[in-house]
Image (cartoon, rainbow, N blue to C red):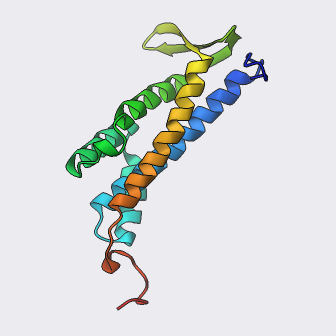
Amino acid sequence: MTATGRATPDTHHAMRASVLELTVTVEFVIDELLSVVYAKSETVAQELQFQLIALLSLEQKLRLLNDVLTEFELHQVAPALMDSLRNLKKLRDLLAHGQVHPPAGELMRVTTYRRGKIRVEERRLEDVVEQARRISEDLKALRRIWIWLLPNREEWFDLGGAVK
């Protein structure tokens, strides 16, 4: 984007890359959060994160995250978090599986091909930028929740015998 907010020829690629990178970061934090909740120790959490949770789809992770937020009554920490994460997943899927075209005015066009059907979807660049800003806020909320759920007991942490 230029200083006036007008789209430049490569804006759509930069925006796509930014959203996809943020999604990877958000998904990694969700993986960490879920592993902390379901593991009995730090070592088990790492194994769970990389050998099981990493194999789940983002949709499955979001369902588990929603269950965790409900179980620990944490929806109030970030009331719009789950809706925002679901919208992020939709945008990620669109950008990851579609061909992004140069902006037409202030619109980003994405062509997708699925099950024999071609579909062109348009998104206002301003809306995509706003969604990316919300994703950054969601990431902060996820980290706050992760810290809240982190076990506060010495036996959870594997300190190699440093604490007895």
> Which part of the image, by quadrant, shows the C terminus?
bottom left
Q: Identify which residue, 110 or 113, lies in the foreground.
A: 110
Q: In the image, what residue occupies the spot 48% across and 50% down? A: 28
The answer to which image quadrant residue 136 occupies is: top right
Q: Identify which residue, 143 or 94, lies in the foreground.
A: 143
Tell whether 110 sits left or right of 154.
right
Tally of numbered tags? 0
Percent from the top left, x then y, of residue 19? 58, 33
> Which part of the image, by quadrant, shows the N terminus?
top right
Q: In the image, what residue occupies the spot 51% across and 36% down? A: 135
Percent from the top left, x then y, of residue 85? 41, 34
The answer to which image quadrant residue 109 occupies is: top right
Tell whether 9 sits left or right of 163.
right
Q: Is residue 155 above or below residue 107?
A: below
Q: In the image, what residue occupies the spot 56% across and 32% down? A: 132
Tell whether 86 sits left or right of 127.
left
Which residue is outermost to the left?
71
Percent from the top left, x then y, of residue 25? 53, 46
Tell whether 132 sits left or right of 150.
right
Percent from the top left, x then y, of residue 97? 53, 24
Q: In the image, what residue occupies the spot 78% across and 22% down? A: 2
